[in-house]
């Protein structure tokens, strides 16, 4: 069974993703070159392909950590309840933090996590996201590094799921509405 048959259209193709990772990697390398061992924190599970491609374009000694965070419990709308399923193992006190995300939509996940990391004493907290969906915001939130701004469509692929499927598509596509309305 092909995954591609459920995709209405491709929004960000493989070449565009490659160019985004190169561009953001250079920008982050430049901005973080005088900081001491910044920590890049990936928010599982959606961050995985983006973080691993982006990190290879950051030419600096960074640490990489993960937190498993979820606010979508099946379906296409956020429950509004951000849960930490697994925390990171390192202290963030006094450290420069760069959170890597696949998408900023309502802003709830990042609002919660940024507040938490600041409360834990992080020196700085910035966001790098592949996709920004500003029309989805319910909480004002502006990520510093954005791959591409997208319209208010439910997207899957390259880490993003619908009911845990489609994360392994190599591109980002708009899911056919009949998949989630049936
Ligand atoms: O801006 P928001 O509306 O909070 O949405 C963004 C979050 O939603 C998705 O994660 P999800 O909770 O589905 O978990 P997952 O990464 O395991 O798929 C995505 O990976 C972001 O972390
Ligand atoms: O458009 C989306 N697709 C998949 N997961 C998401 N989490 C927030 N927005 C989305």
Image (cartoon, rainbow, N blue to C red):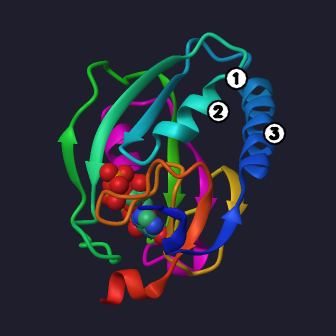
Look at the image and tell me whether residue 42 can be seen: yes
Residue indicated by mark 3 = 23
Decide: marks 1, 2 in contact (CB < 8 A)? yes
Q: Nearer the viewer, residue 44 or 168?
A: 168
Image coordinates for residue 107, horizontal then vertical, percent: 45, 65
Q: Is residue 113 magenta?
A: yes
Q: Is residue 129 left or right of residue 145?
A: left
Separation of residues labelled 3 and 1 (CA atoms): 10 Å
Residue 54: image tag: 2
Q: Nearer the viewer, residue 113 or 124?
A: 113
Q: Is residue 65 above or below residue 61?
A: below
Image coordinates for residue 67, horizontal then vertical, percent: 31, 36
- Please tell me in which quadrant of the rendered image residue 139 appears: bottom left
Residue at horizontal 28 percent and vertical 75 percent from the top: 75
Residue at horizontal 59 percent and vertical 74 percent from the top: 134
Q: Is residue 73 above or below residue 177?
A: above
Instruction: Check disc 2 and report its element: helix, strand or loop.
Output: helix
Instruction: Check disc 3 and report its element: helix, strand or loop.
Output: helix
Q: Quadrant of ligand 1?
A: bottom left
> How many numbered marks does the figure carry?
3
Q: Which mark is first along the chain, 3 or 2? A: 3
Q: Nearer the viewer, residue 88 or 180?
A: 180
Residue indicated by mark 1 = 58
Q: Which mark is first along the chain, 1 or 3? A: 3
Image coordinates for residue 127, horizontal then vertical, percent: 56, 45
Q: Is residue 39 left or right of residue 85?
A: right
- Please tell me in which quadrant of the rendered image residue 72 appears: bottom left
How crowded is the residue under tag 3: few (<14 C-alpha within 10 Å), some, or many (20+)? Answer: some
Instruction: Check disc 1 and report its element: helix, strand or loop.
Output: loop
Magenta range is 110-139
């Amino acid at each position: 069974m092909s995954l591609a048959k459920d995709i209405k259209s491709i929004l960000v193709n493989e070449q565009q993703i490659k160019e985004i990772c190169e561009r953001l990697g250079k920008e982050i390398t430049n901005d973080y070159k005088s900081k001491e061992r910044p920590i890049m924190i990936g928010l599982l599970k959606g961050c995985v392909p983006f973080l691993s491609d982006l990190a290879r374009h950051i030419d600096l000694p960074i640490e990489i950590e993960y937190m498993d965070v979820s606010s979508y419990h099946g379906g296409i709308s956020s429950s509004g309840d951000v849960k930490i399923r697994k925390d990171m193992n390192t202290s963030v006190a006094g450290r420069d933090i760069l959170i890597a995300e696949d998408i900023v939509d309502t802003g709830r996940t990042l609002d919660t996590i940024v507040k938490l990391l600041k409360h834990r004493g992080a020196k700085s907290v910035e966001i790098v996201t592949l996709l920004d969906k500003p029309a989805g915001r319910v909480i004002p939130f502006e990520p510093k590094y954005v791959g591409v701004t997208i319209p208010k469509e439910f997207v899957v692929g390259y880490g993003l799921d619908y009911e845990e499927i489609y994360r392994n598509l190599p591109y980002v596509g708009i899911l056919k509405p009949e998949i989630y309305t049936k």
